[in-house]
Every structure is written in C-alpha cells, then in structure tokens.
Image (cartoon, rainbow, N blue to C red):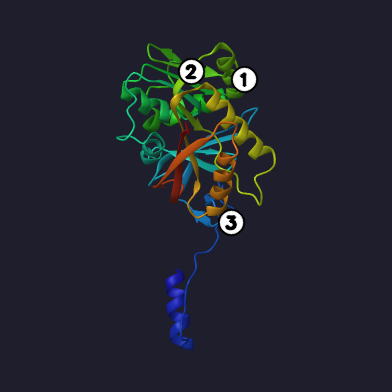
Amino acid sequence: ECREIEGAWGSRNKPKRVKTLPHIRRGIPFDTYFFTSDQRLLEYDIDKIIYDERSPYQHIQIVHSDNLGNLLVLDDSQNLAESDLIYTESIMCRGVEDYTGKEILILGGGDGALLYELRKESAKKITMIEIDKMVMDACQRYLRGACGDTLDVYEKENYKIIVGDCVDFMEKFYQSGRKFDYVFADLTEIPISSTPQGELWNFVKQILNLSFQVLRDDGKYMTHGNGMSSPKAMEMYEEVLAQLEVPVKFTKTHAFIPSFMEDWSFYQIQKNI
C-alpha cells in the first residue's frame, strides 16, 4: 500500500527523490518493537504471546516469531530465541575451549540453553545458579528448542541447578574453598551509561570480583558484553577490568545474534599471573 501511494504521489509531483518509511503500528494486542543496544528501533514478526507473567524479579514473556521461533523477553528486552544457538556457542567459544573433565559454574542462564550445550562437552560437573524459577519454568515448557530437556530435572550426574542468589552462593563457595575451571556470567549485559557508576555497574564489579575468588588460577571467566555499536560501554567495562582486585587479561570476540538483530560482543577473561 505504501509503495502504491509513493508511486502515485511521485508520478503526480515529479520529485527528485521519494522514500517510503514503514508506519508504526498502533493498537495491536502485543508489542512487536524492541531496541538495539544503541537505541535503534526494530520491528519483529511477532504474531502471538505464548507466556506472559510477572515474577518477583521481572516481567517474563515468551512470544512467537516465524523467523526466530519462540523468543524469551525479559522486562521488554529480547533475551534469547530458539534460533540463537550462535549466542550460546559464542559465549562458550565452542571449538576453542575444551571443557572435558572441567568444573563449571553458570551464573544466571535461566533459559537453560547454555547448560544444555555445555552438557554435551563432557564436563565433570556443571553448577548453575538462577534466581528466578518462573523463568526456568516458562522456558522448560515453551523454549525447548533452546534448552532441550535440561530444565526438566534440576540435578543429574554431571549437573545441578540451584534456585537462589548467585552472590550468596559464590560467597559460600569462596568461604568453603570450592574452585571452578570456568565461570560463565550469563547475567545482565554491560550497562549503557555516561560513567561506570551506579547500581548496575556495582553489580558487574561485584560479580567479577567474586568470580575470580572462586576461579582456579588457570580458570576463565566467560561472559557476554553488549552490542558492537556501543563501543563506549565496552571501553568502560575494560577500564573496570583493569581496576579489579586481581590483575586480569582478556580477549574479545563477536557474533551476529538473530534475535538481537545486531553484532554482539563476548569476553574471555583470566587472571594475569
């Protein structure tokens, strides 16, 4: 319809250039718009809401897209779709890291996708700590294309899912002397702000410091960053890394994530000893 109007108007008025922009759809029963990390507006082909509840921690939705499959949305931000295997493989550095016989800690990861893929890597033991059981319950039922059967049972021979605050459990691990070969922080992305200050940044710093307390000296901290179109946020994150209690070194990779519709960064961080 827009193209027809453009053609008719152009024929009548003979402008030098005409460009039609899609209209913003209003009054629809569910939101089809999300933002990139640098606040560009994206429209998705969402055709229905499958799950919509509020937990004590956040607003949880699972929506359906023809292109992406089912998509987990947390507090109105796209989180993980069934088509996002590349996200999980990128945070894992699959094919680069060898998890055989390793002890692994996952912080967050309530969609179950990271645990599901790590279970295939012959790890000795994987411990996952997720605070929001409602997220896991929703994904166990409606995001099986990403998590498989991982969330059906919370403990098996080589993995255990703990429902709780990862900060509390890491402090207990540190006090008891428990160590891990890998810590995966599948939590919030690097904050977008003018300075690395405030509640979210304090949480990022707390998680980093606690993680290196429970990592073995040759262990690695694996996490996602933010969109590659938000370089200032990553610069601030790297400044934070330089100021940690333990000296660290890092590498950074990136990959295009279908449900984010943008290139996303991933960090591999280890003690610089």
Determine contact: label 1, label 2, CB under 8 Å.
no
Give whichever of 43, 108 is nearer the camera.
108
Secondary element at image label 1: helix
Specify whether residue 89 is in view: yes
Identity of the residue drawn at 59% across and 41% down? 240
Q: Quadrant of residue 121?
A: top left
Q: Amino acid at mark 2?
A: Lys
Q: Residues within 10 Å of mark 1 (few under 14, many from 20)?
A: few
- 257 or 195: nearer the viewer: 195
Q: Position of residue 123 (x, y in %)?
A: 35, 20
Instruction: Describe the element under mark 3 as helix, strand or loop.
Output: loop
- Residue that carries the numbered disc 1 in the rendered image: 168
* Foreground: disc 2 or disc 3: 2
Q: Is residue 175 above or below residue 63?
A: above
Closer to the observer: label 1 or label 3?
1
The CA distance from mark 1 to mark 3 is: 44 Å
- Name which of mark 2 and mark 3 comes first in the sequence: 3
Find disc 3 in the rendering and name its residue. Answer: 26
Task: Answer above or below: position of 166 versus 78.
Answer: above
Residue to which mark 2 is pinned: 179
Q: Nearer the viewer, residue 213 or 33?
A: 213
Q: Residue 100 location in percent, x, y? A: 32, 22
Residue for point 47% across, 79% down: 18
Label 3 packing within 10 angstroms: few (<14), some (14-19), many (20+): few
Relative to 171, is 51 on the left or the right?
Answer: left
